[in-house]
Image (cartoon, rainbow, N blue to C red):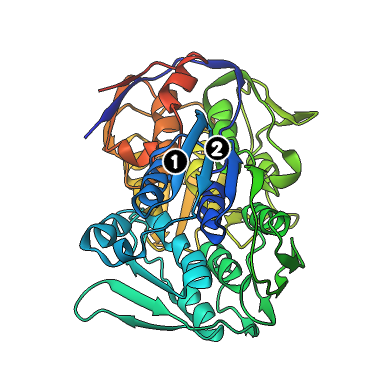
């Protein structure tokens, strides 16, 4: 197990460019299973979750070529379908959340898929019901292998239909889209997720020959086709990393430019930080966060306490709640955070409380932060990263704290952030991997 040793109190200054979007990468890499032609994907982040998914595709017979550090070629023309039923495959799936996105493409193209209950963050339940209900609407059958977390899904033929999803699940929507592209007739998905990652997946599939309309809305129409061909696709910048860098710049920065952020695909992320008083300037497709000795949390028009809550896109992504909480600890004023989606994601705040933050954890979903206005610095401490986003939030807290901190279990951070200590050290941070 690796750890970060962080010497706090060193200001950050300079330019930084976000990596490719992790969540989009997992989706579009799995989409390469839908064709026997070559698929080239560029700007793939070099991170643990994505690399493990690529290795898993190689295990089932996908021909993978690394064209450069962040560019890959995939060719799924000769898959070993027997391997899908092996104990080794099931074990690897159980350790990788992104493996669930293989179900839709495999079911669409080969009529069957085997998947284990996927691993990932310890942030509460992440149910698969939306995925399975979508497949059932299309005509698939599934069963849970007795006394295991393994599921077998099969269908002789998928038939297009109307479906109303029980929740706007991003991975569920992506999986159903990839299954429906080969379904006979027309599939209509209502209450679909419409995040930029889903839009990118749909655009990529359309370039491959799919017929998807309604892209960017929560009502998608998919007319089934018989086959897809190869394509070249470039992944968007990771909006969660952009938000993480905004948080770092607010807490520790002496002027940071975040380059090439794809501003139109950030939604309300910049405005969520502005509600905490963080100044963000826009120059072209770059964000500039100047040094801020003080930032004041807004209140609502009637004077009541500001509330920030996650919501399906274009609402605030739940992946940035942890970072926003850390930023609020040094703001002027108070704010209520409401994390609706996951019941364990706020539990990391006990580590911030140990560092001196004034936070009231109301229940598993709500926390009130009373900002210090930089009058009281956080204290250094030893902590462990419970998940990707809490990990980066704790790293931001440690960089702003007085003294030297240690964060264990940083493999969680590596799952979502490429070369994070090297990139931050180039801005002036003092982070050492041990």
Mark 1 or mark 2: name the one nearer the start of the chain. 2
> Residue visible at 56% across and 31% down?
245
Could you tell whether 130 is left or right of 41 in the image?
Answer: left
Is the residue 433 above or below the residue 94 in the image? above
- Residue 16 place in picture, x, y as percent: 59, 23
> Residue visible at 69% across and 49% down?
268
Secondary structure, mark 1, is: loop
- Mark 2: few/some/many CA within 10 Å (<14, 14-19, 20+): many
Label 1, label 2: how far apart the Cα atoms are: 9 Å
- Name of the residue lying farthest toward the right: 284
- The residue nearer to you, when weighing 118 against 113, is 113
- Residue 240 place in picture, x, y as percent: 56, 43
Do the numbered discs 1 and 2 sit on residues whose CB atoms are within 8 Å?
yes
Is the residue 6 above or below the residue 55 in the image? above
> Residue visible at 63% across and 32% down?
295
Q: Quadrant of the C terminus?
A: top left
Q: Quadrant of the N terminus?
A: top left
- Name of the residue lying farthest toward the front: 78
Residue pointed to by mark 2:
241
- Residue 18 place in picture, x, y as percent: 59, 31
- Residue 3 place in picture, x, y as percent: 27, 29
Q: Quadrant of residue 183?
A: bottom right
Give the number of the disc on residue 416.
1
Q: Quadrant of residue 192?
A: bottom right
Is the residue 151 above or below the residue 342 in the image? below
């Amino acid at each position: 197990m690796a750890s970060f040793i962080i010497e706090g109190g060193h200001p950050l200054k300079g330019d930084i460019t976000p990596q490719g979007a992790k969540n989009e990468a997992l989706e579009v890499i799995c989409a390469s299973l839908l064709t026997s032609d070559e698929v080239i994907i560029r700007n793939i982040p070099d991170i643990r979750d994505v690399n493990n998914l690529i290795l898993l595709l190689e295990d089932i017979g996908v021909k993978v070529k690394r064209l450069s550090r962040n560019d890959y070629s995939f060719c799924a023309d000769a898959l070993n379908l027997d391997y899908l039923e092996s104990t080794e495959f099931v074990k690897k799936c159980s350790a990788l959340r992104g493996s669930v996105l293989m179900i839709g493409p495999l079911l669409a193209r080969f009529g069957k898929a085997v998947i284990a209950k996927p691993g990932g963050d310890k942030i509460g339940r992440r149910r698969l019901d939306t995925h399975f209900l979508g497949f059932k609407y299309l005509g698939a059958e599934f069963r849970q292998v007795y006394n295991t977390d393994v599921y077998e899904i099969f269908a002789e033929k998928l038939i297009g239909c109307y479906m109303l999803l029980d929740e706007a699940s991003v991975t569920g929507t992506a999986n159903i889209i990839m299954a429906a592209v080969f379904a006979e007739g027309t599939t209509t998905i209502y209450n679909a997720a419409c995040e930029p990652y889903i839009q990118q997946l749909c655009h990529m599939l359309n370039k491959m020959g799919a017929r998807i309309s309604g892209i960017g809305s929560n009502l998608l129409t998919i007319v089934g086709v018989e086959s897809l061909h190869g394509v070249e696709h470039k992944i968007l910048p990771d909006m969660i990393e952009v938000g993480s860098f905004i948080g770092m710049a607010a807490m520790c920065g002496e002027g940071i430019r975040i380059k090439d952020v794809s501003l139109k695909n950030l939604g309300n992320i910049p405005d969520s930080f502005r509600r905490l008083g963080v100044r963000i300037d826009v120059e072209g497709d770059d964000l500039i966060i100047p040094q801020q000795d003080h930032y004041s949390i807004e209140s609502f028009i009637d004077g009541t306490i500001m509330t920030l809550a996650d919501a399906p896109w274009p609402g605030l992504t739940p992946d940035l709640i942890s970072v926003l909480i850390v930023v609020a600890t040094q703001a002027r004023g108070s704010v209520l955070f409401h994390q609706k989606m996951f019941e364990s994601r706020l539990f990391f705040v006990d580590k911030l409380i140990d560092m001196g933050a004034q936070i009231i954890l109301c229940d598993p979903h709500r926390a009130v932060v009373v900002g210090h206005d930089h009058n009281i610095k956080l204290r250094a401490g030893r902590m462990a990263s419970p998940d990707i986003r809490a990990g980066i939030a704790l790293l931001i807290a440690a960089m702003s704290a007085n003294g030297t901190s240690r964060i264990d279990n940083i493999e969680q951070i590596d799952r979502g952030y490429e070369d994070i200590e090297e990139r931050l050290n180039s801005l002036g941070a003092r982070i050492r991997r041990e």
